[in-house]
């Protein structure tokens, strides 16, 4: 309750109560920014009201607002938790919906892409370039399905290779280790090395249907623009093999381009 406030207090052993040495706090002892001892507890004076401010300025010529301490609590920031990594069971989209909804719903596919590219199958031929001599003769077909962005890998039959032909990687959406995102069609082109199932595959050619599809969408795949490719081959346009009406073998074309310093 209201009354004199002692500066220094101590405990008497026999009555078991706090006692003071007689000194009490006066107005000149109460300054904003300082501390006082209230019956053994440290109390910080962080601000005062307008009347107290005017009193100290009028009678003691002291500005209490100089050492005001801001004790306002900072706004609480709620950190957004990141979803846990995919454990490999099911698809990543289904696992993510389970983290966001109590009653999960099936993932909605891209209906426009399904309608435009349904049934499309773009095939690239590739070879394994892991440095192992026994894998140099192995040939694979990397199939990309643009309606669902899924990838499948099949091994071709090679005599005396020691490996059976068939499915190497079943059709699924796969992450590209180079980008950290799912494989897209723009990630697959001739001369590109892609990593699938921890194995590096060098794409060496594409089938005719795949080339026609990429040329029809050359605005999305600039490397398939026939005009841009023709401009790069101007330096070898005078070669006799380039003038043959029967055409030229793709591997031979790459050799001629390499001799002229053109990297295909």
Image (tube, helix red, strand yellow):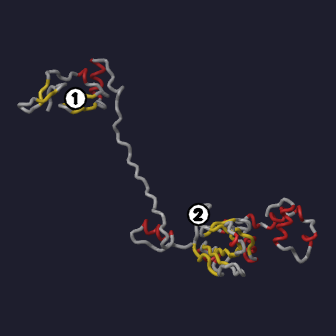
Q: Nearer the viewer, residue 99 or 90?
A: 90
Quarter of the figure with residue 152: bottom right
Residue at which label 2 appears: 181
Q: Judging from the image, what secondary structure is the residue with disc 2 in? A: loop
Give the percent coordinates (x, y) of residue 148. 59, 74
Residue 95: x and y, percent?
46, 69
Mark 2: give few (<14), some (14-19) or many (20+) Cα within 10 Å: few
Image disc number at residue 37: 1
Q: Is residue 112 visible?
A: no
Q: In which quarter of the image is the N terminus?
A: top left
Residue at figure coordinates x 28%, y 31% from the top left: 44
- Whichever of callouts 1 and 2 sits on the residue coming sooner in the sequence is 1
Relative to 116, 107 lies left or right:
left
Q: Where is residue 144 in the image (x, y as percent from the top left)?
A: 65, 74
Task: Please give the label number shown on residue 245.
Answer: none
Could you tell whether 140 is left or right of 1 in the image? right
Q: Is residue 158 above or below residue 223?
A: below
Name above or below for residue 55 compared with residue 103.
Answer: above
The quadrant holding residue 50 is: top left
Residue 155 image offset from top left, x and y in percent:
66, 78
């Amino acid at each position: 309750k209201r009354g004199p406030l002692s500066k220094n207090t101590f405990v008497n052993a026999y009555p078991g109560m706090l006692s003071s040495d007689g000194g009490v706090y006066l107005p000149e002892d109460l300054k904003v920014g300082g501390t006082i001892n209230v019956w053994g507890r440290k109390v910080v004076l962080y601000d005062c009201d307008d009347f107290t401010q005017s009193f100290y300025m009028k009678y003691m010529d002291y500005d209490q607002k100089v050492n005001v301490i801001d004790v306002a609590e900072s706004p609480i920031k709620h950190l957004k938790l990141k979803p846990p990594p995919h454990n490999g069971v099911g698809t990543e989209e289904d696992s993510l919906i389970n983290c966001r909804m109590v009653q999960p719903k099936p993932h909605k596919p891209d209906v426009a892409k399904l309608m435009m590219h349904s049934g499309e199958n773009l095939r690239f031929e590739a070879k394994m370039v892991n440095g192992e001599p026994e894998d140099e003769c192995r040939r694979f077909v990397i199939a990309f399905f643009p309606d669902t962005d899924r990838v499948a890998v099949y091994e071709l039959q090679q005599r005396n290779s020691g490996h059976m032909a068939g499915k190497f990687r079943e059709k699924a959406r796969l992450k590209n280790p180079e980008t950290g995102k799912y494989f897209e069609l723009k990630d697959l082109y001739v001369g590109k090395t892609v990593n699938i199932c921890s194995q590096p595959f060098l794409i060496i050619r594409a089938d005719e249907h795949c080339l026609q599809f990429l040329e029809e969408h050359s605005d999305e795949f600039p490397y398939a623009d026939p005009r841009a490719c023709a401009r790069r081959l101007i330096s070898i346009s005078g070669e006799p093999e380039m003038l043959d009406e029967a055409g030229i073998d793709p591997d031979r074309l790459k050799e001629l381009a390499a001799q002229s310093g053109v990297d295909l």
